[in-house]
Amino acid sequence: MYLYNEFDQTLVNERVEQFRDQTKRFLNGDLTEEQFRPLRLMNGLYIQTHAPMLRVNIPYGLLSSKQMRMFAHIAHTYDKGYGHFTTRQNIQFNWPKLEQVPDILADLATVQMHAIQSSGNCIRNITCDPLAGVSADEIEDPRPYCEIIRQWSTLHPEFSYLPRKFKFAVSGSPKDRAATQVHDIGLHVKKDAEGRIGFEVLVGGGLGRTPVIGQVIAPFIAEEDILSYSEAILRTYNLFGRRDNKYKARIKILVRETGLDKFKAQVDAEWETIKNGPLKLTQKEIQRVKAQFAPFPYQTAVSTNAPNDPQNNSGAFRQWLKQNTIQHKQAGYRVVFISLKSPTQAPGDITTEQMNKVADLAEQFSFAKIRTTHDQNLALTDVLENDLFLLWQQLNDAQLATPNIGTITDMICCPGLDFCSLANASSIDIAQGITERFTDNAIDTGNISLKMSGCMNGCGHHSIGEIGILGVDKKGEQWYQLTLGGSDSHQSKLGDRLGKAIAKESVVDAIEDIIHVYKAQRTVNESFTNTLQRVGLQPFKDKVYAAH
Amino acid sequence: MPLIKNNRLVQDTWHIIYDGETLKSTNNLVDLAYWQANRTELITTHSPIGLRIDGNEDIELIATDLQYFSLIAINFPSFTDGRGYSLAHTLREQYDYSHELRAVGDILPDQALYLKRVGFDVLDLPNKESAELALQKLSEFSVFYQKPVA
């Protein structure tokens, strides 16, 4: 894990004091709401329906147990005893007081954390594969590159007032687990014929009102050039991106209106002038950062008889083992997902006590490190197989072992109308309804990605869910538009509209109809997407709209 | 309006020429349309010349004329419009423009340091209070991840 040196720490401390002053001036009336707005957003602070919401960065989804304890402290001291993990691997606190936010940031700075650029029209948290470093199919660990990009983009003087927000995602494996195709810039680690490391660069992907799959702008940019190439894209975007309409201001619109070829020519012309300048990375700098992501000292000759131990023959344990853990590149270890989709909590929510528990368990079983995932869950990525039963017992006691990872009840969900001032419709109660309906047969139904957003801004990534639910406003009433067949895995795809929007009280029934059709139509082990491709939308339409 | 240069407040020695106004003998700050219409006259009789452009101006329109300007003022129509930062960077780094580069328009004191880091050497703040605050804000950070524009 990257640890701050004195330089990094000074910068974050100075940022806290800067924001403290800005908050004070706003509260004194020396900054208008209009002036304060972009300044506070660049520090992750929204003014929401009930209270401010503070979004804290978790760079590329990696945090230490100490940092998790700090989240618990913040939730307990400044909030209502819980936090909410987001689809971009960050955490949000929904009830802080504006005047206390500088103190929260000061507390965060003591554990090398901050909220810098977690919102606003600037470069946001760099996200990556939650399995980085532990996955057997990995070409190269993407996290050192994420850290290098994080530093370059942090408080970047030129790119702090972009036309719109800007998101990077980096994947180190051929199998894309970072949704890179729906980011403003998506980077795929590649090796060329000589074994040199570089990146395939995608540009102009994004969700929101106009979901677009990113296009390849450069098939291979060598690792030492990744900052200069990124800067060339950002400068081109900053100069030419639309500023007349915030719904057309993302880079995806610029790329579409300019045309990829012309946009690429503009970027290349800019890049040519800077590629051999100060942004060129030295091997020394790359290795300095890489050294901080060295693999853990794994035990090698481990006898893995634990799952056969008679005491471990609890059915619930075995179900959890099968559903919530996956293979690790190191024999004798497994990756454990901690489900934050229990029937008793909103998706992604976690209490103070649970945060402290996760920190304890990370220290006990997983080198004191925790990952956050795009699906709003957590992971302990380096657990000895022999420890799994012990770990499960403790997770289970803390209601953190719902065996539903990848299933329909492991849904992605935005905060919706309950918290968000943009939302048209609620998400959390629909999620609750789906959870209640499917909890008993989620595993039997098989893996299905269900994603839900309370408005077309798409924070719940509905367009790339196998089942997508979008809240819409119809004359003051909450309705829901369903889409089927979206994907954010290797080949991203946007879902197709099922038909007209569905009234709130019928949404859960409609989802059950869809599942019913899938189960009736699927062949053995056939995924939802494959079944849909084979039989088409019609049987699903027939069932859902015949009933409603 | 109050100017900041070399970390202190200074007097403005330039005259902003608005549409239809007569030129002063020297140090006229004109807009792009005026420059284009009166280019020869300005060069021959009114040097040094300053040019005022918007952050979204196409740099190609002035690229071959940069030698004539002792001052380029980049206007920020709104403090949230960041084009002027990239324009300043481009003028300094790609076109090697080395004379005064001034940020004018809607600027917050909180932006002073970023403006300086991308190549502006003079900042035109809307009033004395904000100029004094901007002076303090220039030393708000002691460390940076990015190299400054020279």
Image (tube, grey):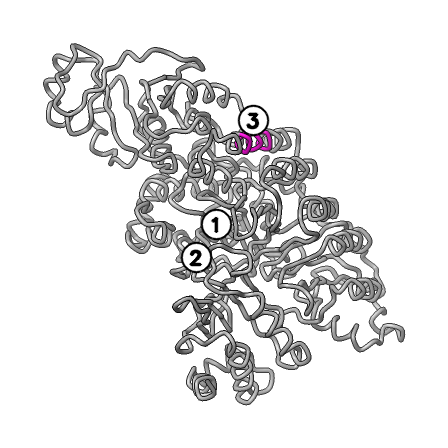
Q: Secondary structure at mark 2?
A: loop
Q: In the drawing, does residue A63 fall left or right of residue A539? A: right
Q: Secondary structure at mark 1?
A: loop
- The chain carrying label 3 is B
Q: In the drawing, does residue A469 fall left or right of residue B57? A: right
- The chain carrying label 1 is A
* Label disc, if present, on residue A206 of the rendered structure: 2
The x, y position of residue A376, in whole percent, is 61, 60
Asked whether the residues under the numbered discs 1 and 3 touch, taking CB atoms below 8 Å apart as contact, a structural biologist would say no
Q: Residue at x 80, y 57 (%)?
A: A300
The residue range painted magenta reads A15-24
The x, y position of residue A326, in whole percent, is 69, 66
Mark 1 crowdedness (10 Å alpha carbons): few <14, some 14-19, many ≥20: many
Asked whether the residues under the numbered discs 1 and 2 touch, taking CB atoms below 8 Å apart as contact, a structural biologist would say yes
Residue wearing tag 1: A167
First in residue order: circle 1 vs circle 2: 1
Query: How much space separates mark 3 and mark 2, taking CA atoms?
Result: 33 Å
**From what the image shows, is residue A136 above or below residue A269?**
below
Question: Can the viewer see residue A294?
Answer: no
Tag 3 and tag 2 share a subunit: no
* Label disc, if present, on residue A300 of the rendered structure: none
**From what the image shows, is residue A197 above or below residue A548?**
above
Q: In the drawing, does residue B64 fall left or right of residue A210? A: left
**From what the image shows, is residue A375 above or below residue A54?**
below
